[in-house]
Image (cartoon, rainbow, N blue to C red):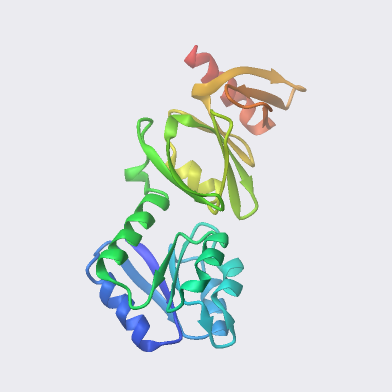
Amino acid sequence: MKIRTLLIDDEPAARAELRWLLSAHPGYEVVGEAAAFGPARLRLARPDYDLVFLDIQLVGGTGFDLVPHVAPAARIIFVTAFDRFALRAFEANALDYLLKPVATERFAASLARVAAALPAPPSLALRPDDVVHISGDGGSRFVPVTEICAVFSNENYSDVLLRNGDRLITRRTLKSWEDSLPAALFMRVHRQALANLQHAQALRRDTRETGELRLAGLREPVPVSRSYLAELETRLAARR
């Protein structure tokens, strides 16, 4: 499966350079381009992309103004001629920040970060012994899959709770986590929550239709909704 890529830059030569750099990486496909703020916002409204190379200074607005319009599961790499925007770019949860002209080695390193950050296709789903790259406002880090206790939906973001008590906020949807995390360990237990059953300590029913799941490492229980309760009880019984 190719990573579908958008190029948003007001300079035709800059877009041509990005296409040339991408041509050396067959796993990527350019599916659209835009040269100004208005057309870029319209193009970003379509969900058929995984990665955006985004210039900061555009006709009609800035790349930062376009960030809220980027699809929740897509990743952003800012490309600009000015290094003064670097801090703000990472505050906007960009995956990387490239300075023009972009060196081929630096570009390849940036794509390596993309491969680590995007959810794997079903045939390449994570295994329990894998390590996952998590990028957020607090920086990026590699985390063993088994150390993830729970993942909560947080609008266009998700909160990843680790066994050591850390909470990581990343620009990734709960559905993308569900598609890539190993199903042998993780289960959706609520419309807004995934839980790692490996860390399950106790399940308590609040009522006949809802419950709370206690996980090792978490101070607060994870809510369990009616539609998942019976399956969760069955899976926990099988693990004992």
Res. 183 visible in picture: no
At x 43%, y 43%, the residue is 180
Instruction: Name the quadrant containing residue 107.
Output: bottom left
Q: Is residue 44 visible?
A: yes
Query: Position of 122 compared to 23: left or right?
Result: right
* Farthest right residue in view: 207
Residue 97 in the image, given as x and y percentages of width and height = 43, 66
Tell me where residue 131 appears, x and y as whole percent: 38, 38
User: Image check: 109 left or right of 55?
Assistant: left
Q: Residue furthest left?
A: 24
Kindly give the residue lying farthest to the front in the view shown: 84
Quadrant housing the N terminus: bottom left
* Place of residue 55 in the rendered image (x, y in percent of width and height, measured from the top left): 47, 77
Q: Is 236 above or below relative to 119?
A: above
The furthest residue to the top: 240
Compared to residue 19, the image places residue 108 above or below, namely above
**Residue occupying the point 76% across, 22% down:** 206
Instruction: Identify which residue is drawn at 56% across, 66% down.
Output: 88
